[in-house]
Amino acid sequence: MKLFRRAKHPPSFDPDGSDAALLAAVAGGATGALEVLHRRHAPWLRARLRYRTSDPDLVDAALQETFLAVWKNAGSFTPRSADGDAAAWFWTIAIRQLISQLRRRANQWIADTDPAPYETIGDASAEDLVLTRVEHGPLGQALDSLSPELRTAIQATVLDGLTVREAAQLLGVPEGTVKTRVMRAKARLREQLV
């Protein structure tokens, strides 16, 4: 005796549609919609993740895990604005995946069994040098002295390069609040660095 079941057909979608519409199609099983989202969002996600680490393998792993999470959780996306912009949602997933990759790498035990010394594979990029100076210089100390609300607002807009709108969506606060926090953070940093 043979059992039959009706084949599931993924929903149709418009490749030029909004991110919210494409995510709804992904939730319905449309792999083509995920490909469109990947082409739209992977380049800028990769660029922003590179600001956080210079290791391209970590960036690639975080991107892969990001789009795997999008595939699995597309049905949980709920647009907060009228246009359904999903960029902040993608960024939130991507940065969490990168942090997970960094934690995995930090928890790996490295045996010192190789007697060969380390070789120089290249110079640090200009971005890496600037970020190192930001973290470990006077600016880093000044940033550490800010309240968590001000620090996350300035980090999202200045260091991560998010727009005020994206930062507001990421932080879950109104755009005006982000602008106020950034303004206050800049004023306090000016006071401490002068």
Image: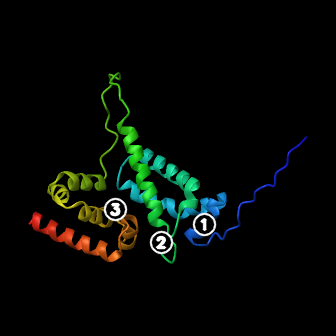
Q: Could you say whether the residue bearing mark 2 is in a helix, strand or loop?
A: loop
Q: Residues within 10 Å of mark 1 (few under 14, many from 20)?
A: many
Mark 1 vs mark 3: give the one in front.
1
Q: Residue at x 44, y 44 (%)?
A: 57
Marking on residue 82: none
Q: Which mark is residue 160?
A: 3
Between the C-alphas of marks 1 and 3, the distance is 26 Å
Name the residue rendered at 38%, 33% in the picture.
Answer: 108
The extreme left residue here reads 194
Is 103 rendered above or below residue 140? above
Q: Would residue 165 appear left or right of 37 to someone viewing this image? A: left
Q: What is the crowding at mark 2: few (fewer than 14 residues within 10 Å), some, or many (at least 20)? A: few
Which amino acid type corresponds to the residue marked 3 in the rendered image?
Answer: Asp
Residue at (44% x, 50% y) in the render: 97
In depth, the one of 138 and 27 nearer the eye is: 27
The span from disc 2 to disc 3 (Cα, nearest Å) is 22 Å
- Residue carrying label 1: 22
Q: Position of residue 161 (x, y in %)?
A: 34, 65
Count of numbered circles on the image? 3
Q: Nearer the viewer, mark 2 or mark 1?
A: 2
- Residue reaching furthest to the right: 1
Residue 38 seen: no
* Colour scheme of the rendered structure: rainbow
Marking on residue 80 = 2
Helix, strand or loop for disc 3 = loop
Closest to the observer, 150 or 105:
150
Amino acid under disc 2: Arg
| Circle 3 residues within 10 Å: few <14, some 14–19, many ≥20 | some
Image quadrant occupied by the N terminus: top right
